[in-house]
Amino acid sequence: MVAPILEQIEAEHGDRLTVAKLNGDDHPEIVARYGVMGFPTLNLYRDGEVVRQIVGAKSKRLLLADLQGHF
């Protein structure tokens, strides 16, 4: 559901961010490590540390608003 929006954002802002996807069902240890309670969950990293966690499906406009100031 969120993948097409993330692909658009990456196409428009790929020079300033990298989008990576992980299947939580295939990697439960990573889900547990980051305290993910539901899907979709988007983690924003800077220098290897989570600086923002966004939970739930959002429109492109709302997702870009959440990312404002981070890239």
Image (cartoon, grey):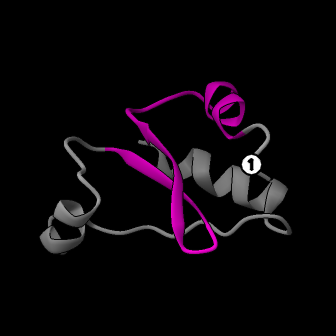
Residue positioned 71% across, 50% down in the render: 9
Q: Quadrant of residue 60?
A: top right
Residue at 70% x, 35% y: name it.
64
**Residue nearest the viewer, comparing 7 with 71:** 71
On screen, residue 9 versus residue 54, left or right, reads: right
Q: Position of residue 19 (x, y in %)?
A: 60, 66
* Left/right of residue 29 with respect to residue 13 in the rendered view: left
Residue 25 appearing in the image: yes
- Residue pictured at 69% horizontal, 26% vertical: 61
Location of the N terminus (image quadrant): top left
Magenta highlight on residue 44: yes
In the rendered image, residue 11, in percent from the top left (x then y), is placed at 77, 60
Q: Residues within 10 Å of mark 1 (few under 14, many from 20)?
A: few
Question: Is 9 left or right of 44, judged from the image as shown?
Answer: right
The span picked out in magenta is 40-67
- Does dot 1 land on a helix, a strand or a loop? loop
State whether residue 70 is above or below residue 33. Answer: above
Q: Amino acid at mark 1?
A: His
44 over 69 or under it: above or below: below
Q: How many circles with numbers are drawn on the protein?
A: 1
User: Taking the image as drawn, is residue 24 in sight?
Assistant: no
- Could you tell me residue 42's position as x and y percent? 45, 50
Q: Give the residue number, with chain letter if any, for mark 1.
A: 70
Tell me, yes or no, whether the highlighted magenta stretch contains residue 71: no
